[in-house]
Image (cartoon, grey):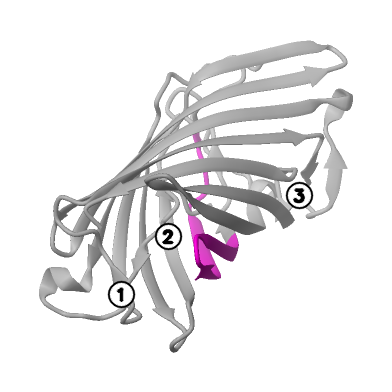
Amino acid sequence: CSAPHSSPTLAQSGSIRTLPAGAGWIQLSGYGQNAQEFFNPEGSRQPFLADSEFTTRSAFLTGASGLLPGLELWTQVPIHRLRIDASSGVSTSTGLGDLRFAARAGSRLVGLDLPLAVRAGLKVPGSDFPVDATVIPLTEGQVDVELSAESGVFLGDLPVYAMAWVGYRWRGTNEDADRKPGNETFGHVAIGGFAGAFSWEVAADGLVGAAPVAQGITLEGEKRRLLQIFPTLGYGVGPGRFEVTAQIPVLGRNLPVASGLSLGYRWAWGM
């Protein structure tokens, strides 16, 4: 919902720090999900037609770098392997998904020391959108722009932090399919902490979407909703940190529903 996922370094003073100039990190992660049902327009869970199963296997390369004090840049490149197994047959697609770019501006950019940051993001298709109902698309086929505000604090002297952001996503038009997805409001709230080499976090992530427009017709019944829980455990390994994150859907509308698992390794420098 809030991609590119934000992982700001929280300063001991309780503020969100942007990366120092020249510092950065890279994370390679893998994600898997098997979905056999979806949230229907009423919000109930319903099996896919034809006893279908939708399998997602993805790899994400995400990186961030400090450009100057108070400003950092983000990039995320995904590769997907998607598969649908149905009673009528099997369909697969493999390749680049939507590319995401973002800039985070912290209060230090204007000479302040406040626990606030603003993120502006851009999503562009990484591959062509197939105008063919028999081919699984790897991208949504349009350009999206988003803006969010972020904050976070440490809880007193405890090695525990709380963080949150809220934002809005303006969704472009897929010209090939003559379809414009509905704009979305998204949010994220998390609490986490550290215990020696271990780290933990429990987060909730959600979105509320407006009605999409297809061939000039507003589809009120296809508004999207989603609320998910993300528990994460991490451990320092070598020069970086290994992280395991589960994805647990709670409620939604017009989206697949299935638990997922992500494994990632993050390496940082100049921190």
| Magenta residues (range) | 179-205
Q: Nearer the viewer, mark 1 or mark 3?
A: 1
| Percent coordinates x, y for residue 122 in the rendering | 33, 44
* Total residue callouts: 3
Residue at x-position 56% and y-position 30%: 58
Please say if 101 is above or below 1: above
Mark 3: which amino acid?
Pro
Give the prevailing secondary structure in the magenta stretch.
Answer: strand
| Whether residue 134 is situated above or below residue 238 in the rendered picture | above
Specify few, some or many for label 3: CA neighbours under 10 Å numbering under 14, 14-19, or 20 or more: some
* Residue at horizontal 42 percent and vertical 21 percent from the top: 127
Judged by depth in the image, the label closer to the viewer, 3 or 2, is 2
Tell me what residue is drawn at x 33 percent, y 78 percent. 12
Q: How far apart are marks 1 and 3 (CA)?
A: 36 Å
Q: Residue 61 versus residue 103: which sits nearer the camera? A: 61
Q: What residue type is labelled 2?
A: Tyr
Local secondary structure at mark 2: strand
174 relative position to 107: left or right: right
**Which numbered disc, 1 or 2, marks the residue that appears first in the sequence?**
1
Q: From the viewer's perspective, is residue 72 above or below residue 222?
A: below
Residue 197 belongs to the span the image colors magenta = yes
Residue indicated by mark 1: 116
Q: What residue type is labelled 1?
A: Leu
Figure check: 45 above or below 232? above
Most distant residue in the bottom direction: 156
Q: Mark 2 highlights which residue?
A: 168
SS category of the residue bearing label 1: loop
- In which quadrant of the rendered view does residue 93 lie? top right
Q: Distance between the residues labelled 1 and 2?
A: 17 Å
